[in-house]
């Protein structure tokens, strides 16, 4: 009995390997698959890296008041009155830095202990630290904070205009996570999301549908191949192609744009693998259900590529969206992948961000792969 079980296991492995070789040769003989899997990632990396720039408004800011006074309370009130900020009080600088690392705030405004005394002397300094993973966001945050402080000074002036005795308040700027202040450092990691989505979802969405249209799926029904073996054989080649796209994107980000990778490379590979499995699962489920290449392609584009571009935080800051779209973004896996990529590349191994994102992706991958197996039946409906 044990020998029969071992024999069946070996036969299953041989069947999967044979189908995998067949699928690999089919990919190599398909110029469009090579173009999408290898050439397109490089083109997207160059186009998005060099040609795309954007602005973001409303930003959450942590305010650290080390010694409360009438001046600090008045200044913080001016900041609260600005529609561009949501103020998050922080007791210490360490607490504010923790909020910044976990992406809960985009800027820190620190009032030093002797701020009121320095204001009375006519020369005070404020510290502004901004999350510069997005260079444009960093510039906007600095500008808006300076504007809020200027409004506070003007409001406190008796006649509404700067008086000669008005104190000179200097703003000390610091760029966190993107000291070079370059948009490419923010955009290039996001390109990986689009690359993995294209390879994982769009290509695999055509796999089973193509078999149905060509009538080759019926031929498999006469063999002892199981649904799980069919899906595994079709997943392995595209998984390898997706990891190749990841490698090309990471290498390009380093050598073309000098984007740092401050987190662990192995952690990046792990999170990317989870997202790739999610994308593969989406493509296989859609392909199994539709049985039409055209319909599968259209549905996959709508449920994967568009959300990965518009609702993932890659181009538009999710916190700047209305509450409705913010809730909708939580069902799209690209949101969690973008968050982890930006953290790993520019901030490092911030576990408070990466672990929840990885957990959500793992659960999505398991559900989608299970659904794909259940959707692939050896019968003709």
Image (spheres, rainbow, N blue to C red):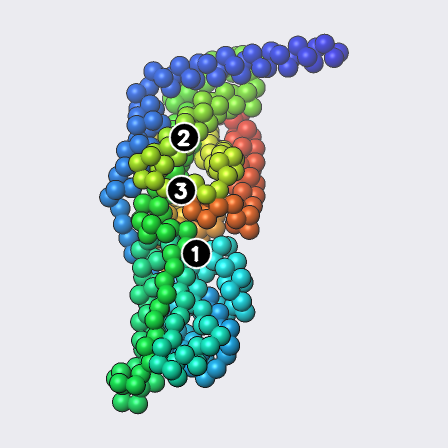
Residue shown at the point (52%, 31%) measured from the top left: 372
Q: Nearer the viewer, residue 212 or 207?
A: 207
Q: Estimate the x, y position of residue 191 in percent, counting from the top left.
A: 35, 40
Frontmost residue, 342 versus 127 = 127
* Left or right: where 37 falls relative to 289: left
* Residue indicated by mark 2: 247
* 301 sits to left or right of 332: left
Q: Position of residue 101 (x, y in %)?
A: 49, 54
Q: Name the N-terminal-most of marks 1 and 3.
A: 3
Q: Which residue is mark 3?
A: 260
Task: Estimate the x, y position of residue 163 in percent, counting from the top left.
Answer: 27, 85
Q: Give the spatial CA distance, label 3 vs label 2.
A: 15 Å
Picture disc at residue 326: 1
Is the Cβ of the residue at disc 1 closer than 8 Å to that at disc 2?
no
- In the rendered view, would you say 340 is above or below 285? below
Farthest bottom residue in view: 158
Asked whether the beta carbons under mark 3 and mark 2 sit within 8 Å of each other, the answer is no
Q: CA distance from mark 1 to mark 3?
A: 29 Å
């Amino acid at each position: 009995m044990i020998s029969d079980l071992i024999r069946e296991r070996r036969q299953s492995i041989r069947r999967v390997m044979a189908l995998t070789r067949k699928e690999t040769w089919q990919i190599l003989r398909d110029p469009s698959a090579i173009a999408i899997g290898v050439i397109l990632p490089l083109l997207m990396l160059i186009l998005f890296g060099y040609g795309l720039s954007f602005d973001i408004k409303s930003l959450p800011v942590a305010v650290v008041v080390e010694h409360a006074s009438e001046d600090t309370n008045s200044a913080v009130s001016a900041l609260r009155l600005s529609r561009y900020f949501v103020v998050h009080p922080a007791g210490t600088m360490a607490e504010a830095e923790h909020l910044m690392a976990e992406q809960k705030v985009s800027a820190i405004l620190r009032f030093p202990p002797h701020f009121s005394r320095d204001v009375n002397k006519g020369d005070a300094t404020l510290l502004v630290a901004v999350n510069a993973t997005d260079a444009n966001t960093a510039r906007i945050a600095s500008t808006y904070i300076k504007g809020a402080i200027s409004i506070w000074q003007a409001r406190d002036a008796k006649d509404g205009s700067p008086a000669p005795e008005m104190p000179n308040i200097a703003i000390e700027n610091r760029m966190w996570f993107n000291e070079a202040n370059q948009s490419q450092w923010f955009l290039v990691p996001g390109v990986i999301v689009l690359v993995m989505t294209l390879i994982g979802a769009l290509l695999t969405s055509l796999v089973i549908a193509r078999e149905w249209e060509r009538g080759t799926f019926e031929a498999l029904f006469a063999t002892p191949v199981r649904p799980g073996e069919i899906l595994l054989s079709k997943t392995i080649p595209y998984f390898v192609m997706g990891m190749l796209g990841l490698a090309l994107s990471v290498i390009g980000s380093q050598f073309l744009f000098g984007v740092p990778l401050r987190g662990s490379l192995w952690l990046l590979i792990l999170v990317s693998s989870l997202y790739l499995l999610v994308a593969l699962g989406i493509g296989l489920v859609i392909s199994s259900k539709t049985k039409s290449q055209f319909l599968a392609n259209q549905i996959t584009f709508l449920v994967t590529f568009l959300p990965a571009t518009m609702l993932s935080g890659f181009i538009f800051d999710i916190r700047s969206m209305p509450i409705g779209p913010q809730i909708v973004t939580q069902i799209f896996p690209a949101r969690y992948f973008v968050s982890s990529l930006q953290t790993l590349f520019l901030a490092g191994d911030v576990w408070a961000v990466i672990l929840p994102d990885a957990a959500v992706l793992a659960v999505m991958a398991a559900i989608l792969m299970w659904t794909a197996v259940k959707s692939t039946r050896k019968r003709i409906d």
